[in-house]
Amino acid sequence: KLMLESGLIVMTAFISPFREDRAAVQSLISNIDFIEIYCKASLETCEKRDVKGFYKLAREGKIKNYTGIDSPYEAPKKPELIINTDKETLDESVAKIYSLLKKKLIIN
């Protein structure tokens, strides 16, 4: 919020599985400045991308409350943009975000 208030464009990426937590963050920032982008990926894709082996450990019961295994993920109800990382290339995903930022007059 401090960086946003000083005039910067701030982008953050979090694994944020609960709608209530995302709403709490959104309440700290004006609706004009908050854009929710849902980077969607299937559990299978997340497991394939897991270079640290956390999903395997969670499936073995060695990590508890792991998102997608024994803890739910609550998808956003109305994100402004959905990036489907299972089907889009990185370039396609970036282009969609860039287009949204241009449409909202955040960038030229």
Image: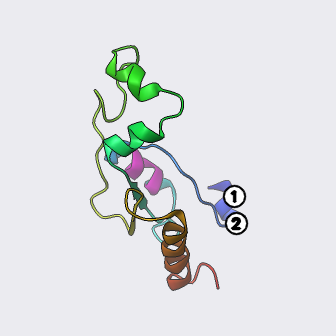
Give whichever of 107, 33 is nearer the camera.
107
Residue 40: give x, y in percent of width and height: 37, 55
Give whichever of 58, 7 is nearer the camera.
58
Give whichever of 22, 69 is nearer the camera.
69
Q: Is residue 19 above or below residue 63?
A: below
Instruction: Tell me which residue sits at (48%, 64%) in the image.
Output: 89
Give whichever of 12, 32 is nearer the camera.
12
Q: Is residue 23 magenta?
A: yes
Residue 68's tag is none
In this rendering, position of residue 99 left or right of residue 48: right
Q: Secondary structure at mark 1?
A: helix
Q: Is residue 56 above or below residue 44?
A: above
Q: Secondary structure at mark 2?
A: loop
Q: Is residue 35 above or below residue 95?
A: above
Q: Is residue 87 magenta?
A: no
Mark 1–mark 2 distance (CA, rounded to whole Å): 6 Å
Q: Quadrant of residue 3?
A: bottom right
Residue 30: give x, y in percent of width and height: 49, 65
Residue 3's tag is 1
In this rendering, position of residue 42 left or right of residue 24: left
At label 1, which amino acid type do we have?
Met
Q: Is residue 87 above or below residue 58?
A: below
Q: Main secondary structure of the magenta part?
A: helix
At label 2, which amino acid type do we have?
Leu
In this rendering, position of residue 5 left or right of residue 70: right
Tell me if label 1 and label 2 are in contact, CB under 8 Å. Answer: yes
Instruction: Tell me which residue sits at (48%, 74%) in the image.
Output: 96
- The N terminus - image quarter: bottom right
Within 10 Å of disc 2 (Cα), the crowding (few <14, some 14-19, many 20+) is few
Residue ID for mark 2: 8
